[in-house]
Image: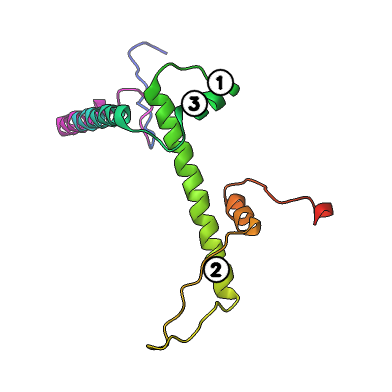
Amino acid sequence: MSQQQQQPPQQFAYPLSSDVNASYPSTSTSQSTQNQSRQNAEDAKKDRTLAEFLLMLDDYEPLIPNEVTDYYLQRVGFECEDVRLKRLLSLAAQKFVSDIAADAYQHARIRTNAAGGRTRNQPFGGVKDRTRTTLTMDDLSAALAEYGINARKPDFYM
């Protein structure tokens, strides 16, 4: 074979080289530049939003006290001096507990409505009496099971 003979270029369904824009007209380069500038603008906006959120955490006092958060973070080996990060973790724990409580409440409401609920006739029309909802361990266990936490007692205790 002589060096003058050239093999035809292989064509693939997708580009194999890192220079994807080499085979496309110049409009795609302007589009990729436009997409890249849009991505940079979105990243800058996210950074500003995160910075503003961290500044808001300076003034926020979560329901879980800082001492409790420090104790549990120290217990698992997490060392950090940034109070804002600790408050962020405390806020995440607060939301987790709140979600579990809301789910347990929904389970209790479903349980009481399935049992027929309690109604009583009022003198001024047949308005339902608002009953108090009692959360039970079964409601809490059902809510925790949705998050993958097993809180049921062993069978021999029942």
Q: Is residue 156 above or below residue 41?
A: below
Residue type at numbered disc 3: Glu
Q: Nearer the viewer, residue 152 or 69?
A: 69
Compared across the picture, whether 154 is left or right of 124 comes to right
Q: Are marks 1 and 2 in contact (CB under 8 Å)?
A: no
Q: Residue furthest front?
A: 123
Instruction: Tell which tag, 1 or 3, sits nearer the viewer.
Output: 3
Residue 15 lies within the magenta run: yes
Whether residue 7 sits left or right of residue 55 in the image: it is: right
Q: Is residue 112 above or below residue 79?
A: below
Helix, strand or loop at mark 2 = helix
Secondary structure beneath dot 3 equals helix
Residue 127 percent location from the top left of the image? 41, 83
Give how far apart the Cα atoms at labels 1 and 2 are.
Answer: 40 Å
The structure residue drawn at horizontal position 58% and vertical position 54%, both measured from the top left corner, is 143
Q: What residue do we see at 43% from left, 38% from top?
A: 63
Magenta range is: 14-36
Q: Sequence order check: which comes first, mark 2 or mark 3?
A: 3
Circle 1 is placed at which residue position? 74
Taken as a whole, is the magenta stretch helix, strand or loop?
Answer: helix
Q: In this picture, is 21 found above or below 132?
A: above
Instruction: Identify the residue at image location x=40%, y=35%.
Output: 62
Position of residue 52 measured from the top left corner of the image (x, y, whole percent): 25, 30
Q: Any magenta on residue 72? A: no
Element under label 1?
A: helix
Mark 1 vs 3, N-terminal side? 3
Q: In front: mark 2 or mark 3?
A: 3
Q: Residue furthest right?
A: 156
